[in-house]
Image: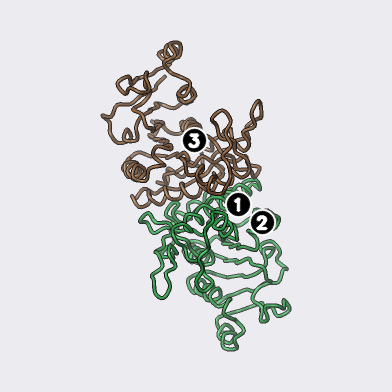
Chain colours: A green, B brown
Amino acid sequence: MKQKLKIIKIGGNVINNKEALSSFLSDFSTIKELKILVHGGGKRATEMISNLGLKPKMVNGRRVTDKDALEIVTMVYAGLLNKNITAQLQKNNCNAIGLSGADANTILAHKRIVKDVDYGFAGDVDAVNSDVIKILVENNLTPVFCAITHDKNGQLLNTNADTIAAELAKGMSKYFEVELIYCFEKLGVLADVNNEATLIEKIDFISLSSLKKANIITEGMLPKIDNCFDALQNGVKKVIIGKPKVIIDENLKRTTLTL
Amino acid sequence: MKQKLKIIKIGGNVINNKEALSSFLSDFSTIKELKILVHGGGKRATEMISNLGLKPKMVNGRRVTDKDALEIVTMVYAGLLNKNITAQLQKNNCNAIGLSGADANTILAHKRIVKDVDYGFAGDVDAVNSDVIKILVENNLTPVFCAITHDKNGQLLNTNADTIAAELAKGMSKYFEVELIYCFEKLGVLADVNNEATLIEKIDFISLSSLKKANIITEGMLPKIDNCFDALQNGVKKVIIGKPKVIIDENLKRTTLTL
């Protein structure tokens, strides 16, 4: 039987709040199973771009990563955030090792092909090097991934953290029974985003299509859910979407996705 | 017999020049032995401090690392420089893994005790976790260390890169036959800093004291040399000071330090 591995992704709602981050990292450190953390960037990169007198470039609500923006996200994600998270986990006796996809060639990507929009140095993931990540986790190290990858040709790339978490989960399923957990600000997938009472506790492949047909899973959530089912179809055992406390509180409501 | 391990430190003269860095990393990648790279910060951190409208604080020619400066060196050293160096090494098929001292708890330090001057978040190294670094190098990974350490209490610390290289060399001597190589802009230790013909090719413990007495090893070089002999007295086999090409060119003149 495969050993269990939890892959947990946190986003801006945790990263942007010092107390929330500290509390989350404390909870995370108590997880007994093998684990990997993936963190997004939060608002610090955007702040840094402004502080340097530059303007964040957005198209259709997505960041365009030009050369300057790539330098800044590399500094903020792989430097400031990743190393502070790692140091805090070390304080909690969690033997964290902060990584970008370039480190140990863990995550290979390519610069997004230009169709209608040129997103600049945005990376789409090609491969996860699960063999080397396996060596790290089996030596009791806890990888902490920021959302920076590389193309093996010397180019760093800014990559969506949700996608990194899903790709890591798929890749690591080769060796482990992987549970993928997305932590965000809501209880889970809500039929009405403003009403937590409308939480959809379970979604499987059959209910997914009816939820889509009934327009209950809406635009913002759709790519996230599609990512989750892609992960499930590629070996991931279970996907959970919920609040950060879901990682330690078994009784906290959540959305569980299975095939 | 212990396996050989080369620990190579590069500073500003390589870091600040794109072509010099690219050429160095290409040479470094061809080294067959196990190896570790340690890099300094160069001028990018100082530039970034200015670009953000802050003023670099210096006392006696040394940086005072206040809270803002620490954030910036963490971004620039551990983020921008470390990840770009790692990505370039990956391009050269060197399986680099970029690390700070917080990652895998590799380098423990404490905030420098305030005597006459408060250097802020400057770290003095207490311990190198050679066991975990051994696991990495024995799995064909090449650690690339930036000059950021931690105190195991959640605090990152700005640490002298020469010292990090020496401490790593001492720590790794437990398991490996370590050669420590400092690359800088001169041929090696020069009796007259402006004349490369005055290169001192060999320094041992006996000649060191006469060089000191004769004031040939002067103020700027003294702490570096003392670091080297401290390393030699703690198990390091050989220390080399020379130009970056010294890592691949056996015929290039250099200073070799032995006990």
Q: Residue at x 72, y 78 (%)?
A: A195
Q: Amino acid at mark 3?
A: Ala
Q: Residue at x 65, y 53 (%)?
A: A29
Label 3 resides on the chain identified as: B
Q: Given contact means CB atoms under 8 Å apart, are the residues at marks 2 and 1 in contact?
A: yes
Q: Where on the picture, by quarter, is residue B57?
A: top right
Residue A164 x, y percent position in the rendering: 50, 64
Secondary structure found at label 1? helix
Q: Is residue B59 left or right of residue B136?
A: right
Residue A232 x, y percent position in the rendering: 52, 73
Q: Given contact means CB atoms under 8 Å apart, are the residues at marks 3 and 2 in contact?
A: no
Q: From the image, tell me which residue sits under label 3.
A: B161
Residue B252 x, y percent position in the rendering: 28, 29
Q: Residue A21 bears which disc, if any?
A: 2
Q: From the image, tell me which residue sits under label 1.
A: A85
Q: Does label 3 lie on the same chain as label 1?
A: no
Q: Nearer the viewer, residue A7 or A115?
A: A115
Q: How would you rate the neighbour count of disc 2 (Cα within 10 Å): few for under 14, some for 14-19, many for 20 or more?
A: some
Which one is in front in this view, the residue at disc 1 or the one at disc 3?
3
Locate the C terminus of chain B and report the quarter of the image it occupies.
Answer: top left
Q: Residue at x 36, y 48 (%)?
A: B94
Q: Amino acid at mark 1?
A: Ile
Q: How would you rate the neighbour count of disc 1 (Cα within 10 Å): few for under 14, some for 14-19, many for 20 or more?
A: many
